[in-house]
Image (tube, grey):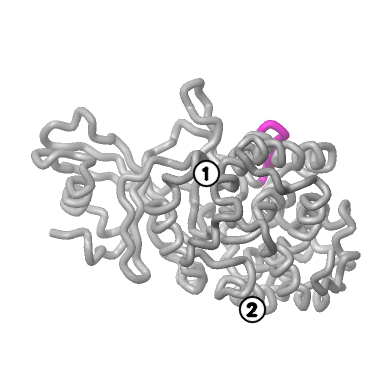
Amino acid sequence: MSVHPLPPMPAGITGEWLTQALREKGVIGAQTSVATVTREQVGEGVGMMSELSRLVLTYQGDAQSAPATLIAKYPSQNATNREVAMSYNLYERETRYFAELDPLTTACAPVIHLTELDGDNFIILMEDMADYEVGDQIVGATLEQTEIAIDELAKLHAPFWERADQIQWIPHVSNSFHATNMQNLAISGWDNMVQTFGEFLPDHVRACKDDLLRSIPALQAHTDRPPITLAHGDFRMENLLYGTAPEHHLVAIIDWQGPLLGRGMQDVTLLMGQSTQTEVRRAHERELLQRYLDGLAALGVSNYEFDQAWDDYRHTHLHNWAYAIVVSGALDGSNERAFAWMSQMIARQVATSEDLGLLELLPFGGKS
């Protein structure tokens, strides 16, 4: 038996299939087999493009070093979300990130035991970090949680700073299929966003619809100027696992389906503008921005000054409206928890726009 072609997920995650897959990857020995596998859903309403299951395993044979549990990640069973995922090539981007780029950065991610991609089907088997605390996007990030996440972003961005263009299979934030999809889905998703989340959208934001949607290509281009690096692309609280014990990493980053090439500030502002508690961002955003720059400098990045970073900070916050519109207007938010975190995302994006006078930058034509 081979792991290719992949069986339908998640039904294909059987003891027999896991035995072969884990043997091929050296996770278990040739004389060890998976006797039973119990699948438990993880994070209902959290993963939009994919689904997660915890696999509780028992073995036959020598299982002293075999994992008792694993996390399996596989395509969303929601047809709407899966179609969006395929249009952005998300499944390939995540499997290739772990295979090719994760070893090049000290940013922490789960240990990966298996990544397999087969057309619109994929499977990732990773370590179970159940004793870590999943970031809560509804509650929002505290100052300490934001600081820890900012430090990890510097570790991710610095190794690829001005060296990321050699990664041909990751799209740029502008002039790419990703950019086109973002613009088209934002245009088609605006009215759905207003209909579903209208209570969080003041009239002065709704009045900016045409100027904002027309400005997306210029904002993408502004976010895609040198210095270019590798960005996570979906850097929000529920993609962060915070350590709860002394032996833990401070944070681990999950969900690598959307890496992008462009300014690293897009990750910083997605976190601070849509996940960090608004009162925390208001009180500490300049010092948090300086913390990010200090982290980059400690890792050898010397060509990024505060004034340039602040300009990027404002414009990428404005650009993040495209993300908010696509997530809330084009994806299925009918799940109660999904609706709750999308509501907070929009409320924080509105507050950021008001605090920083971002809507005054519209219509944006490409100049700082």
**Magenta stretch in the rendered image:** 138-144
Say whether residue 336 is visible. Answer: no
- Residue situated in front as seen by the camera: 356 or 71: 356
Against 310, is 193 above or below? below
Identify residue type, mark 2. Asn
Residue lying furthest top: 246
| Residue underneath mark 2 | 184
Identify the element where label 2 is drawn. Answer: helix
Residue in the picture at 59% in, 39% down: 152
Residue in the picture at 79% in, 52% down: 308
Is 140 colored magenta in this rendering? yes
Q: How many callouts does the rendering have?
A: 2
Side (left or right) of 291 relative to 118: right
Residue in the picture at 18% in, 32% down: 63
| Quadrant holding the N terminus | bottom left
| Residue underneath mark 1 | 253
Is 2 colored magenta in this rendering? no
